[in-house]
Image (spheres, rainbow, N blue to C red):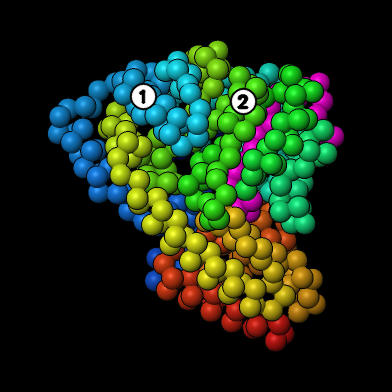
Amino acid sequence: MGRWPEFSRSAKLDGIGVSEIIRIGAEARNLAASHDDVISLSAGEPDFPTPDNVKLAGINAISTNQTRYTALDGTAELKAAIRRKFRRENGMDYAENEISIGAGAKQVLFNILMATLNPGDEVIVPSPCWTTYLDMIRLAGGMARVVACSEETGFRLSPEQLAAALTPRTRWLLLNSPSNPTGAVYRAAHLAALGEVLRAAPHVGVISDDIYEHVLYDTAPFATMAATCPDLKPRVVTVNGVSKAYSMTGWRVGYAAAAPEIIAAMAVVQSQSSSNPCSISQVAAIEALDGPQDVIASRRDAFRGRRDRIVAGLNAIPHVHCLLPDGAFYAFADMRALLARPELKRRDIADDAALCRYFLHECHVAIVPGFCFGGPGYLRLSYAASDRMIDDALDRLKTGVNRLLAG
């Protein structure tokens, strides 16, 4: 097919491309076509199957012809299940008109930003962070005010950092706990301290991305801003979904709870994009939320074992350091000491992106470089993989590093 010579991309896309995580995954799949031993630790999705009861609910929805348009931002039945979830697990009450359902938490986040940001509005984003946040903010006309959070503070935003980042143009603080990519968790005490700062800034709201809520490893209860600081609840949007907890990434169901005026504005955006979420997926999501929940604990226990396995293995590699994450299913490994070695510089491996390319093409292990998340010098490794795959990948990485250090 010929090209359209007058075509030009919108200026809105300047500096924005396909997610590096998706690109690396595609490159790994292409390499696997000729080398069947490629191990991918780049995916941000559980490797477990969707629970059988949830799959059966979806099959039943098809069999009973629940395949038509639904209400714009979700069925009343799924909204009721989400409200029950918030009461049961988070101690928060919401009305039906305070719930919005979209095609995944990603769309829900996009709807929030599109519905609320004006040109020049600022969103404070603690970093390292999921790279998509920054591109979404930009597409919505806002400006990301990225605040670097160091390993020394557990990759968490401090109240002092928040206070220093606030301006009259600040519209939102965007928190993700447990975090992608670091696994950092904001406990109730951390959120309460941030809430104290926010009380003095009534023009600032909070977007709380809780998608990894159920991948939390210690005994302290999960905390979210609207529950921890109930007086701030009218200006908090709590985002969640069924993708991570129930291994339903492909079903595309995410949801948000917020004040009615925010939900109504989000509905306007969704009405002009995807319209309603998939009818079949909504039925399955009801079963996920209302059905047996034992799968969450058993899979969390499996992730905990994998976490311990991969972090120990990474810390056994020369010049590599990795903190033990408190949640999610990613290890965020510090490669800065390794990258500073003269042996790597002689091989033109000067940064985390080059190191990832080496690991992919020479060791056949796909990993995401930390610069994608605002953490240059780090690598993100997903341990949503079997013990055998993790052990094999660690062996390959250690061998690859030793080969580099041998000159």
Indicate left or right for 233 with 338 as reference.
left
Indicate left or right for 390 with 72 as reference.
right
Quadrant that contains the C terminus: bottom right
Q: What is the number of the mark on residue 80?
A: 1
- Residue lying at the far bottom of the rendered structure: 406
Q: Secondary structure at mark 2?
A: helix
Q: Position of residue 7 (x, y in %)?
A: 56, 30
Q: Secondary structure at mark 1?
A: helix
Q: Position of residue 368 (x, y in %)?
A: 59, 58
| The one of 203 and 389 positioned closer to us in this rendering | 203
Q: Residue at x 59, y 73 (%)?
A: 312
Q: Position of residue 352 (x, y in %)?
A: 69, 62
* 404 up-or-down from 167: above or below: below
Q: Residue at x 25, y 49 (%)?
A: 52
Query: Residue 209 falls in which quadrant of the image?
Result: top right
Q: What is the number of the mark on residue 230?
A: 2
User: Mark 1 or 2 closer to N-term?
Assistant: 1
Q: Residue at x 73, y 35 (%)?
A: 194
Specify the segment rendered in magenta. Answer: 164-184
Task: Please identify, in this view, whether the residue under mark 1 or under mark 2 is nearer the observer.
Answer: 2
Q: Are marks 1 and 2 in contact (CB under 8 Å)?
A: no
Residue type at mark 2?
Pro
* 186 up-or-down from 218: above or below: above
Mark 2 crowdedness (10 Å alpha carbons): few <14, some 14-19, many ≥20: few
* 144 up-or-down from 155: above or below: above
Q: CA separation, marks 1 and 2?
A: 21 Å
| The one of 288 and 274 positioned closer to us in this rendering | 288
Q: Residue at x 70, y 86 (%)?
A: 406
Query: Residue 176 falls in which quadrant of the image?
Result: top right
| The one of 226 and 363 positioned closer to us in this rendering | 226
Residue 363, can we see it? no
Mark 1 crowdedness (10 Å alpha carbons): few <14, some 14-19, many ≥20: some
